[in-house]
Amino acid sequence: MTDCKKIADLIFPDVTKTADYYETKYPQRNLPEGARVTRFAPSPTGYLHFGGLYAAFASKFTAQAANGIFMLRIEDTDKKREIDDGVSCIINGLSAFGIEPDEGVTGFDSEKGEYGPYTQSKRREIYRTFAKKLVEEGKAYPCFCTAEDLDKIRESQENEDIKGYYGKYARCRNLTDEEIEENVNAGVPFTVRLRSEGDISRKIKFDDMIKGKIEMSENVNDVVILKTDGIPTYHFAHAVDDHLMRTTHVVRGDEWIASVPLHIELFRALGFRPVKYAHIAPLLKEENGGKRKLSKRKDPEANVTYYIEKGYPKESVQEYILTILNSNFEDWRRANKQESVSKFPFNFKKVSVSGALFDLVKFNDVSKNVISLMTAQKVYEYVTEWAKTYDNELYALLTADPKKALAIFNIDRENPKPRKDIACWSEVRDYLSYFYNEIYTPNITLPEHINKADACEILTKYKELYSENDSKDEWFAKTKELCTLCGYTPNVKEYKANPDAFKGHVGDVTAVIRVAVTSRVNSPDLYYIMQALGRDEVIARIDTAINFYRG
Ligand code: GLU
């Protein structure tokens, strides 16, 4: 007859606390009815993947929409795969996109909240207490099999439908107390395994928040819950942590679905109420007419530092993530144009079951739209903040004359149809290069249908008409006057009706001025550009163009 209590004391001589102690230490949370407690639980094994950010947002938004708590837990039980600055990569990555967890790890060796520690390597004592409880209750046992023993078991299972450590293969499941004592006293390394009570012919049913109803066979494997070094496996740590942190909803990658029967069995064996699951499919990317997973290896945009380096504001990233995360987000946005995303009623039912499509072109469009709605002041702050690290020259130019920079960013902004030119801050240098001679390389090539002599005439006459004190209406009236003076018509319709009667229309005349002043055929409002440049610069550029066209 096995004396489970004795075995538990033998293999966990260091454990002095009890499960009850922790149940009391981490009480049920005092939250409003229906509040959700979620967490993002990455391993610090590399840079933050865009897919990770996407899942983190799903966790955050669901907690936020239900007045709950969103935590950050660091799952660092696999020391071999860990990288040095893994935790900072995660924290900086999240914070760059506006994710500040309500609880959990906040930095190197710092955290906030009453349900910690939030770093798994600091929870060793807790895992061991709960593993001891399972051993005491006969629900777990020490296993002395070596890696070679396990290899042999695997080899002998070639023809088995079910692989793993179960039934006749579970060699340590029924060791006698004497055998266990002998091994432990001889210092034989051991793992601790769950004594599974599953039956392969029985089904387990659960309702996934995203995937819907799922039915799977029960787990039958006596899986390892503590490794030989006393560190928990992901499965065991998940059950213990999410119970003690009082998580209500676990949002995670759908590669974990296959483990749900085991996880539910663990929750039950431990006497815990299972959490609700929301399994997210990986992000997809279109390629050669097909779809494939967004890949860390192949796609630079899979790394969140891509967005930081290019200078995408957090608002754009949030807006795009919600666009692909909830299929009704765009409708909501159309109806709530100015509303903060924090007001969006996030819903798991609207998350793609098979994987959302990640599309950089669409991302850029969303970002342009988001930036077009920002004030010039906000754009200025964001650009200078970004440029401080990534473009020193631009930083110096913008901060040397903030008034000029603000005037530039204000062109065509704050009107019902703001221009959508900028998708990210690294595009700003090119966007405003013609405002700063230090970074401006003129290229005043005329549109093909306009000849140099006509351009000279337009520019020469314009110089006589131009005054920097003109209002916009006066400026426009002069442009029209200039048309007439040079054989063009101010009226495009008139030109179309009778093209032979004119050299061209007002669009051609402004094109000549625009090219001379900005080197572009397309630009924001020319009147405001000329205001920002100032009279001297405008005249100097017009003179340069006249000389250039004259040859
Ligand atoms: N550390 C696990 C991972 O990175 C977390 C999975 C989970 O959220 O439970 O895949």
Image: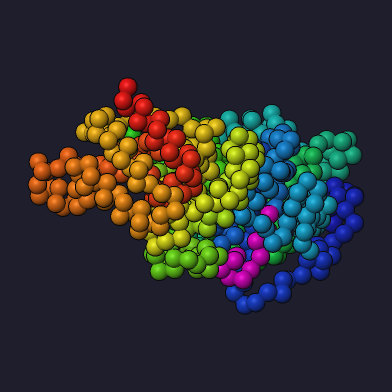
Q: Is residue 168 visible?
A: no
Vertical arrangement, residue 27 with respect to residue 399, above or below: below
Examine the structure image and report whether residue 532 is included in the region drawn in magenta. Answer: no
Q: Residue furthest top?
A: 551
Q: Is residue 59 visible?
A: yes
Q: Position of residue 138 (x, y in %)?
A: 75, 56
The quarter of the rendered structure image containing the C terminus is top left
Which segment did they paint magenta? 62-72
Q: Residue furthest front?
A: 464
Residue at (47, 58) in percent of width and height: 373
Q: Quadrant of residue 539?
A: top left
Front residue (pair 104, 169): 104
Q: Position of residue 329 (x, y in %)?
A: 43, 62
User: From the viewer's perspective, is 540 left or right of 69?
Assistant: left
Total marks placed:
0
Front residue (pair 141, 72): 72
Vertical arrangement, residue 158 with respect to residue 168, above or below: above
Vertical arrangement, residue 18 with respect to residue 177, above or below: below
Residue at (82, 66) in percent of width and height: 25
User: From the viewer's perspective, is 477 left or right of 406?
Assistant: left
Residue at (56, 68) in percent of width and height: 65
